[in-house]
């Protein structure tokens, strides 16, 4: 049954399909057809439409070109990679050699062994961001400084309120230090406020990496590159001594891109020289102890010539001729003129009648396209610039402290007037 059914199926015609007539196909119908010969297309002739690739959108063409360029770059890098790798290896070798040499300088040291120094220094890593931040910019046009813009950026309402809170928390210590040293509480509060906003921003760069980078790869286009690299090499050495003597972890300490640390942003050498134990716990901790920071800032200013009960700056009425003004500005911020010499050159201290027995400097503060401002900086003003050698910085510190002090006075509860006594 199955076979008969199969034969019937083969004999039934299939409508519309040629060759399915119900009779067996002739052997000729099974022969392979002759191959079709396709004539070659002339080179100059355009491709037939059915063979052309569809046109790509502009973005797709760009991606295709970019991919081709990337492939070419990879091919080139394969050939040029060896010299680049060799240069990188040479730089790594020079870096390791300098670190090893510094560690070796402790071979005869009484406090630190060369082995301990190398254990730390071998883990220093080059920080490209630190180098970029220290690289002098080359603007097309000279930069014009702007005191008012600088002041507005630093002396903000938020920073003043943070200063009030800081002053209130440490009011007794600030009063005691001012009475003992003659350094006003407002100046200490101003410095800590400008430096770290009262400990809120102490830096996030590993100090070991920052100091090593600046010691051994200081930007070569800096006009004092060698001098600065030597400075940071000494600071790196002081950092090792500081960590070793104070039991600090040199691999975790963080600070600014220049290697300054803690609430007052002291460099390692300043920490060791001027750091003081303000809370009397036997340790100088400028990172976790605001009391130590307060005492250390006051000690730093005293060591750099702060004079008790004397102003840091005075106003000035200028009546100077151009030649006199040039003579007044020549010493920059270095106190040079006594009051009599200033008056002879047309610079009158303000308020009128002010008497000051020390030396002063005429300080110019540029205001962009607007006229500059002038003040008279005293020895105390100069002492603040030893913290940061900028007259703009020093005046911002002093005026922030003044603003915090004024705000505290505004917030003091007003005493009710005394009742009148009837006769």
Image (spheres, rainbow, N blue to C red):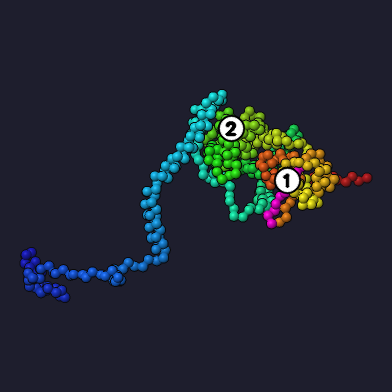
- Circle 2 residue: 238
Q: Name the foreground residue: 365 vs 75.
A: 75
| Residue shown at the point (72%, 53%) measured from the top left | 372
| Residue shown at the point (38%, 60%) measured from the top left | 64
Q: Quadrant of the C terminus?
A: top right
Does residue 363 show up magenta in the picture? yes
- Circle 1 residue: 330
Query: In the rendered structure, which disc, 2 or 1, sits on the residue that comes first in sequence?
Result: 2
Q: Is residue 154 visible?
A: yes
Q: Name the foreground residue: 364 vs 297.
A: 364
Does residue 267 show up magenta in the picture? no
Number of marks in the rendered image: 2
Give the image location of residue 197, x and y in percent.
64, 44
With 371 as the anchor, is 233 left or right in this view?
left
Q: Secondary structure at mark 2?
A: helix
Tell me whether the residue at label 2 lies in contact with that at label 1, contact meaning CB atoms closer than 8 angstroms: no
In this view, 234 is above or below 149: above
Foreground tag (2 vs 1)? 1
């Amino acid at each position: 049954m199955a076979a008969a059914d199969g034969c019937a199926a083969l004999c039934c015609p299939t409508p519309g399909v040629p060759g399915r007539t119900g009779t067996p196909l002739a052997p000729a119908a099974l022969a392979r057809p002759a191959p079709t010969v396709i004539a070659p297309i002339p080179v100059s002739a355009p491709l037939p439409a059915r063979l052309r690739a569809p046109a790509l959108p502009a973005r797709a063409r760009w991606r295709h070109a970019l991919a081709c360029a990337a492939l070419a770059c990879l091919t080139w890098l394969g050939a040029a990679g060896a010299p680049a790798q060799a240069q990188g290896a040479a730089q790594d070798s020079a870096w390791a050699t300098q670190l090893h040499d510094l560690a070796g300088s402790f071979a005869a040291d009484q406090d630190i062994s060369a082995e301990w120094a190398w254990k730390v220094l071998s883990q220093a890593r080059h920080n490209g961001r630190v180098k970029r931040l220290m690289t002098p910019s080359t603007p097309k046009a000279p930069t014009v400084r702007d005191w008012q813009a600088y002041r507005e950026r630093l002396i903000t309402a938020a920073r003043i309120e943070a200063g009030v809170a800081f002053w209130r928390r440490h009011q007794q210590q600030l009063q005691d230090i001012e009475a003992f040293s003659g350094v006003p509480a407002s100046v200490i509060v101003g410095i800590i406020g400008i430096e770290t906003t009262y400990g809120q921003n102490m830096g996030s760069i590993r100090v070991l990496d920052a100091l090593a980078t600046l010691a051994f790869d200081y930007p070569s286009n800096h006009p004092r590159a060698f001098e600065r690299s030597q400075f940071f090499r000494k600071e790196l050495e002081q950092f090792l001594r500081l960590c070793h003597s104070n039991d600090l972890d040199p691999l975790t300490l963080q600070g600014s891109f220049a290697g300054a640390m803690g609430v007052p942003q002291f460099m390692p050498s300043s920490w060791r020289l001027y750091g003081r134990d303000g809370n009397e716990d036997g340790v100088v901790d400028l990172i976790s102890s605001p009391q130590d920071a307060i005492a250390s800032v006051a000690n730093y200013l005293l060591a750099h010539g702060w004079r008790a009960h004397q102003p840091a700056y005075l106003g000035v009425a200028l009546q100077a001729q151009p030649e006199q003004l040039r003579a007044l500005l020549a010493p920059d911020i270095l106190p040079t003129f006594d009051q009599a010499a200033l008056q002879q050159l047309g610079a009158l201290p303000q308020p009128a009648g002010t008497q000051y027995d020390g030396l002063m400097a005429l300080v110019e503060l540029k205001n962009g396209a607007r006229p500059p401002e002038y003040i008279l900086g005293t020895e105390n003003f100069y002492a603040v610039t030893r913290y940061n050698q900028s007259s703009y910085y020093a005046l911002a510190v002093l005026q922030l402290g003044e603003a915090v002090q004024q705000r505290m006075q505004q917030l003091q509860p007003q005493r009710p007037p005394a009742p009148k006594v009837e006769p």
